[in-house]
Image: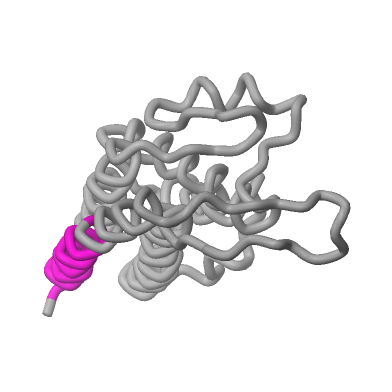
Amino acid sequence: MKLTARIDTDCRCLDRYFNKLYVLLQEALSEENAAPLEVHDYDADESQAIYHGSSHLIKPDMLMNIYSLVDFWMNEICEYHRKQKNLSLGSKDIKGDNELHARHKYLTAYAGLNLDNVQASYMRLNELRRVRNTFTHGGGHVPSKREADFSAIDGIVLSGSLISIEDSFIWSALEHAKKYLQAAARA
């Protein structure tokens, strides 16, 4: 099976999975809205909360899945082009601002692929990477000096320092991942 077909299959699987997660999200939100009010004693050593919801975990999980898809396929695509072009260096040998940038640089500068037609997708994947890293390393809280940068990302809303992910960001990131990965595999 060709790389593009395998990428398409993985993206379709994520699409179906996300649609099921959105059903779960609605159920979780309904449960949370119907849950009794929580009483917090802020002087207590331990939380007095009686209900713990899970809806806030679903969209970040979707982002992690998309990023994992990109991370896996970027390695595969770089290795594919290394073999096809008989290149001596692998993608891990190229330095960049981050892993995504290093792999993009490997494909464009070293392997000589023209990915200009998916530059917007690459930029969206870089936004995905930044948002994902903020959840992974900062619990979804943006440092105050970077709030303006995150507020400028379409589909991301800040509530104080906490990132809120709109549905449009999830679907856009998945679509751009598919577009970029397939273009890089075909190039």
Q: Is residue 11 above or below residue 130?
A: below
Q: Residue 143, position in %: x, y?
A: 74, 34
Q: Residue at position x 29%, y 40% from top? A: 167
On-image quarter of the N terminus: bottom left
Dominant secondary structure (helix, strand or loop) of the stretch shown in magenta: helix
Which is more toward the observer, 88 or 172?
172
Residue 122 visible in the shown view: yes
In the rendered structure, the answer to whether residue 45 lies left or right of residue 162 reads: right
Q: Residue at position x 26%, y 59% from top? A: 27
Name the image colouring.
Answer: one colour
Q: Residue at position x 66%, y 32% from top? A: 161
In the rendered structure, the answer to whether residue 117 lies left or right of residue 87 reads: left
Is residue 3 inside the magenta stretch? yes
Query: How many numbered marks are there?
Result: 0
Q: List the single residue furthest toward the bottom.
A: 1
Residue 4 visible in the shown view: no
Q: Is residue 150 above or below residue 4?
A: above
Which is more toward the observer, 19 or 50?
50
What span is in magenta? 2-22
Q: Residue at position x 25%, y 44% from top? A: 171
Q: Residue 17, position in %: x, y?
A: 21, 67
Task: Specify the quadrant of the image occupied by residue 7.
Answer: bottom left
Q: Is residue 55 above or below residue 170?
A: below
Q: Is residue 14 above or below residue 155?
A: below
In the rendered structure, the answer to whether residue 5 lies left or right of residue 75 reads: left
Q: Residue 57, position in %: x, y?
A: 47, 59
Which is more toward the observer, 84 or 164?
164
Q: Residue 131, position in %: x, y?
A: 54, 44
In the rendered structure, the answer to whether residue 138 lies left or right of residue 107 reads: right
Is residue 58 inside the magenta stretch? no
